[in-house]
Image (cartoon, rainbow, N blue to C red):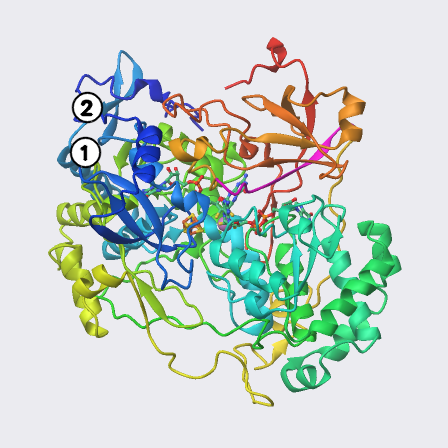
Amino acid sequence: MKTNRRQFIKIGALGTGGIALAATTHNWSFAADLVKKYVAGDTAGQRTATYCEVCFWQCAGWVYKDEDGEIQKIIGNEDDPHCNGRFCPRGTGGIGQYHDEDRLKTPLLRTKENGKDVFKAVDWDEALDFIAAKMKGIAEKHGPECIALFTHGSGGAHFGHLLKAFGSQSITAPSFAQCRGPREVGFLTTFGDIIYSPERTDIRDSKCLVLIGSHIGENMHNGQIQEMSDAIDKGATIITVDPRFSTAASKSKFWLPIKPSTDMALLLAWMNVLIENGWYDKDYVERYTYGFEELKAHVQPFTPEWAYGITTIDPNVIRKTAKEMFDASPAVIIHPGRHVTWYGDDTQRLRAVAILNALLGSWGRRGGFYNPEKANVPDFPVPEFPTPKRTPTEAYEGKYNLANEVVSNGICDATIPTPDKNCSFKMWMVNGTNLMAALPNQKQTIDAINALELLVVVDTMPVEITGYADVVLPECTYLERYDMLRKSPHREPNIAVRVPAAQPKYNSKPADWIAKKLAEKLGLDAFFPWKDMEELLDWQLKEIGSSLDEMKRIGVKKFPRTYDDLYFAPGEDVSFNTTTGKIELYSTDMEAEGFDPLPVYTPHEEPAEGFYRLIYGRAPMHTFSRTANNPNLTDLMDENTLWVNPKVAKLWGLEAGQEVKLKNQDGIISTFAIKVRITERIRWDSVYMVHGFGHNNKKLSRAHGRGINDTELITNVKVDPVMGGTGMRSNFVTFITDIYSTENEKKS
Ligand SMILES: Nc1nc2c(c(=O)[nH]1)N[C@H]1C(S)=C(S)[C@@H](COP(=O)(O)OP(=O)(O)OC[C@H]3O[C@@H](n4cnc5c(=O)[nH]c(N)nc54)[C@H](O)[C@@H]3O)O[C@H]1N2
Ligand SMILES: Nc1nc2c(c(=O)[nH]1)N[C@H]1C(S)=C(S)[C@@H](COP(=O)(O)OP(=O)(O)OC[C@H]3O[C@@H](n4cnc5c(=O)[nH]c(N)nc54)[C@H](O)[C@@H]3O)O[C@H]1N2
Ligand code: SF4
Ligand SMILES: [Mo]
């Protein structure tokens, strides 16, 4: 394998291709301006409807501009069930994405200059002609299915449409196999349905909310936080299981500082206690479930005393918390979490979570899990897509048969040719996902990229993945574009519209424009028959009795439910979408695939002497790696810190604020250093950091070199055999206190 065919282009080379950037330099003293405008109370003038793209909760809001037409602030839309009129700090600061002067400004094409790879600034026609020619060549030689799209965010709809028209359905997102996949499959195999986003958890009416490594409060998914705070006000019990004293733990009646990686033992012990004491919903279990007797026999040995030795949680606390859940049932939620790819047996852990909910009868009940409904919006009529000769799952044939979405790492791995399989993929289009931060095992990602004939990256910022691209396409931010309607399921079906509040800055373009233009160059015009997004949206909206004009005025529209089935009616007969038509405590699907039909506890790897488990999570003011350079949000937090228990700090002689580098179990040393935060809030066997920092692209002037990128230390990946999820929490680090020692120079 040629590993250096594609030199990583240090972004310093941006624009050195000889063509002056078409960029206008934005006169920028934003923070000061903002304060002035706010103080002056200047919110008059035009407001524009949008929904936020800073994270995937997609809150609907209003954008306000000043008298010069400059975007000044964004606030929540009162009618929006995702946010109820209130944005989170990231959403409010989201306008920093628009103002960020480090944005990608014009298309870039990889070229050679004096034997060195550099980016040349080109116009859109040249960039898209180049891509179209390459795509045609690849399709002729290998088939259009060889082109894969990695996408996260709104642009996926446009590029996905283009790819399908071209004959490929190889479309994948890190939000499945790096995020919520195990919970969807765990719940699908149990209840015959998934959790969706926003989660169908009826938190506002819950009497007991159990959070297992779900750190709502730092995880800022807006509606959930609001509902959790309402539930707390109404006296709900919160039980938090987390090796770290999280924000949620601080609001909890019970904090269970579990030994990391042992949650399955606790879940089995809870089942044992519920069943042994008859603390479960007998009518519900009898009426709706399959396999109770098998489950009962299975969990019989898993007593709280057994779990104590594994989890370090006091058996009495296990009993007491089980009783709390039962007393609240059915208005109880054992929360399925969201980023659940932890240890490789994650689908099984989420099956255990699903089973607990079933025992307590919370699925389909007020205060448990409601039945969400999505607005039914027709697609603009287009010709039928060609049928691909190969489906993307053939890339990992025979594996992950229960995955209900395409497995990103499966596509990534299959891109690397092996003797028996010469590469399923020759081109990647990467939209709105910084794969160098999102996919663990960076070396594998780089090896796959090196095997490609073409890598096209569509992004707003010069993030790490752009450095590997052949072509970089600058998308404008969500504040400068239309997008497809938001129509996520909720208690009431609803839609939200995104309308541009400003013209695209620099030479950036919206994804819909890029996809349509590229389609024209590929002779696929017939699949993009609309003139522009206004025509497309207006057509869709008129089909459902609204219009673009109306949506511009109201931003969000709700529709009545088709059926009155938010919860099960008392004693109602319900048929579940599983093989048995029942809630499967005993999973026939898992059994048919050769997996344990009832969840089993498996011990996971432990840190070696002197090493600590690396755990990571969210900070309220940032989203993954995408906001680390945002001028507004860096004002609130501009680096991550390393949480270290005082006992460990003492052992190592670490002081608060001291900078350390980290080395993992495979000898990988972090590129940058991180400041130590000494706190009792983390167990002694683990260290913790917020994901998304440690950017190594110099063009990110505020984010470069600030903190550590957890992803580079995640080289031991435990793949879930059920659905392909990448378990990332079996990585262990030790401290390098002499951060300037040359021995610690990162080899690149
Ligand atoms: N180590 C580690 N890995 C993780 C996680 C973790 O906690 N730790 N979390 C996992 C989870 S839960 C998830 S969901 C994934 C998230 O994975 P990603 O969504 O890929 O996360 P980001 O790193 O924020 O990358 C987003 C990219 O989109 C770009 N972007 C932002 N707005 C736009 C836009 O409007 N248009 C376009 N074209 N681009 C835009 C940003 O500049 C950024 O480069 O990561 C997963 N991977
Ligand atoms: N502010 C902000 N909010 C976000 C996001 C963001 O980027 N920024 N991203 C959103 C997305 S896409 C996702 S997927 C979610 C992710 O958020 P969640 O699903 O809530 O949480 P995770 O990131 O999986 O888990 C982090 C927590 O797990 C704990 N933990 C670590 N190991 C273990 C263990 O072995 N057992 C237990 N019980 N706990 C453990 C950590 O201490 C930490 O508190 O957040 C969403 N909300
Ligand atoms: S939760 Fe915050 S960042 Fe996410 S969509 Fe809503 S306002 Fe935006
Ligand atoms: Mo996620």
Residues rendered magenta in the picture? 610-621
Q: Is residue 617 magenta?
A: yes
Q: Position of residue 71 (x, y in %)?
A: 26, 40
Q: What is the three-letter code of the residue carrying label 2?
A: Leu
Q: Which amino acid, by three-letter code, is at mark 1?
A: Asn
Magenta stretch holds residue 573? no
In the image, residue 619 lies at what x, y percent?
54, 40
Figure quadrant of residue 518: top left
CA gap, disc 2 to disc 1?
9 Å
Label 2 sits on a secondary structure element that is loop
The answer to whether the beta carbon of the residue marked 2 is less than 8 Å from any atom of ligand 1 is no
425 shown above or below 348: above
Residue furthest left in the image: 531
Residue matched to label 1: 507
- Which of the marked residues, 2 or 1, is nearer the chain's N terminus? 2
Q: Say which residue label 2 marks.
A: 21
Residue 57 location in percent, x, y? 43, 54
Is residue 140 visible in the rendered structure shown here?
no
Residue extending farthest to the front is 40
- Do residues under tags 2 and 1 come within 8 Å of each other at their CB atoms? yes
Q: Residue at x 24, y 52 (%)?
A: 48
Which residue is pictured at 34% across the width and 38% down the height? 39
Q: Is residue 533 left or right of residue 436?
A: left
Residue 374 x/y as whole percent: 38, 70
